[in-house]
Amino acid sequence: MLFDRMRSARNADQYSFQIAPSSEEIKSGIKSADNFINRMDQLLNETNPPNNP
């Protein structure tokens, strides 16, 4: 849901004349993306642990 909202905001920014996002909104989006990537890495490691020689 969060990424859909960010996609909609990006779409509106690129194709309309709305006000640009604030630095707080940008920082929040980057933090959310970072959290998402970290969680995906964690899940991948839990479901497919690396082989230890």
Image: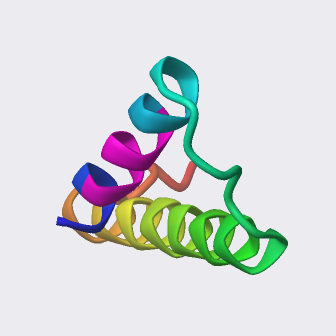
Name of the residue lying farthest toward the right = 23
* Residue at position x 43%, y 67% in the image: 36
Name of the residue lying farthest toward the front = 17
Q: Quadrant of residue 45?
A: bottom left
Task: Judge by depth and name the residue closer to the eye, 32 or 49.
Answer: 32
* Residue at position x 28%, y 71% in the image: 46
Say how the picture is coloured.
rainbow
- Number of numbered labels in the structure image: 0
Query: Can you say whether 39 is above or below 4 in the image?
Result: below
Query: Can you say whether 4 is above or below 16 in the image?
Result: below
| The stretch drawn in magenta includes residue 40 | no
Q: Where residue 38 appears, x then y in whole percent?
A: 53, 69
Q: Which residues are magenta?
A: 5-10
* Residue at position x 36%, y 42% in the image: 7
Name of the residue lying farthest toward the top = 15
Task: Judge by depth and name the residue closer to the eye, 24 or 37.
Answer: 24
Left/right of residue 21 with respect to residue 11 in the rendered view: right
Task: Judge by depth and name the residue closer to the eye, 38 or 46.
Answer: 38
- Name the quarter where the N terminus is drawn: bottom left
Left/right of residue 25 with respect to residue 35 in the rendered view: right
Task: Judge by depth and name the residue closer to the eye, 27 or 40.
Answer: 27
Q: Where residue 16 appears, x then y in whole percent?
A: 48, 27
* Residue at position x 55%, y 23% in the image: 14
Magenta-drawn stretch, dominant element (helix, strand or loop): helix
Q: Where residue 28 appears, x then y in whole percent?
A: 63, 78
